[in-house]
Amino acid sequence: MRSVFFIGALALAVGALPRHAASDTLEVSSAVLNEINIVSGSTPGWLPTEDQLRQAIAITEAFLNAIDGGRYDVAHGLLEEDFKRGQTLETFTQIQTKTTERSGPSSHWKVTKITWAKSSTGTRLPGPYVAIDLIGKYENADRNCGYIVVYQPPSGGDFTVMRREILVLDNTSAREIETTRSKAELDRIWAQVSSVCPNYDPAP
């Protein structure tokens, strides 16, 4: 589904959306907020509302805060129902703790791009989807990228988390690669890994 979201995405010129209140844990620049990216193949003429943008940012922040705080039951409760049924709380917790063991805790997230789709070809359910690209600030992983996809039913209401992908190359592994091979090999490996994140922006 990720490729569906980003193949042929369009940036539409629209009026500036309001800047969200600053957050200690989730950074979203005015430039990212004000660029509305719509996937080709979405419902013709559809645009997200300001309220949908606020909701999408809010659930993303709540989900990340719950994971970073070790409140995996709360994060699991924010998953879309089919996703939740396919991944038990026990499995979900194991995945999150394994990532934290390698990377250390995260203290900050930066949104690099927001992309929307509504009832686009290839999506499983009708309604709006939002793909939010992220870079985290981890204690032991300077190289990381990922995204969260959130979904709202066509009837409206709360967004839920449809998918989360996070790719991490922890600093211990990075130093080992650079020491035993080369810096060029480290860069090559990370470029290959991060290519899964289609809108990855390594700039701080």
Image: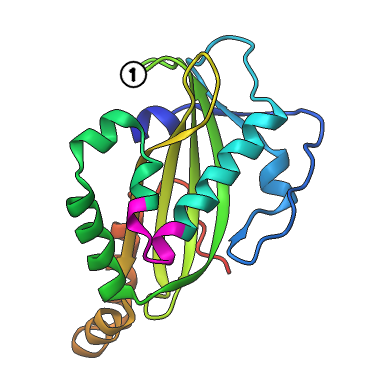
What crowding class fits label 1: few (fewer than 14 Cα within 10 Å), some (14-19), or many (20 or more)? few
**Image quadrant occupied by the C terminus:** bottom right
The part of the image, by quadrant, that contains residue 126 is: top left
Quadrant of the frame with the N terminus: top left
Q: Which of 39 and 58 is in front in this view?
A: 58
The residue beneath circle 1 is 122
Up/down of 196 relative to 48, above or below: below
- Magenta region, residue range: 66-73
Residue that appears at 33% across and 49% down: 196
Identify the residue at the far top of this view. 44
Residue 118 among those drawn in magenta: no
Question: What percent of the width, then of the height, locates residue 158?
Answer: 52, 30
Q: Which residue is drawn at 62% across and 15% down?
A: 46
Badge 1 amino acid: Gly
Q: For the residue labelled by badge 1, is the local secondary structure a helix, a strand or a loop? A: loop
Q: Where is residue 171 in the image (x, y as percent from the top left)?
A: 33, 81
- Left/right of residue 116 with respect to residue 183 in the rendered view: right
Say above or below: 99 vs 40.
below
Check if residue 69 falls in the magenta segment.
yes
Q: Quadrant of residue 82?
A: top left
x then y, percent, for residue 172: 27, 84
Residue placed most toward the observer, 39 or 29: 29
Main SS, magenta region, reads: helix
Above or below for 108 versus 140: above
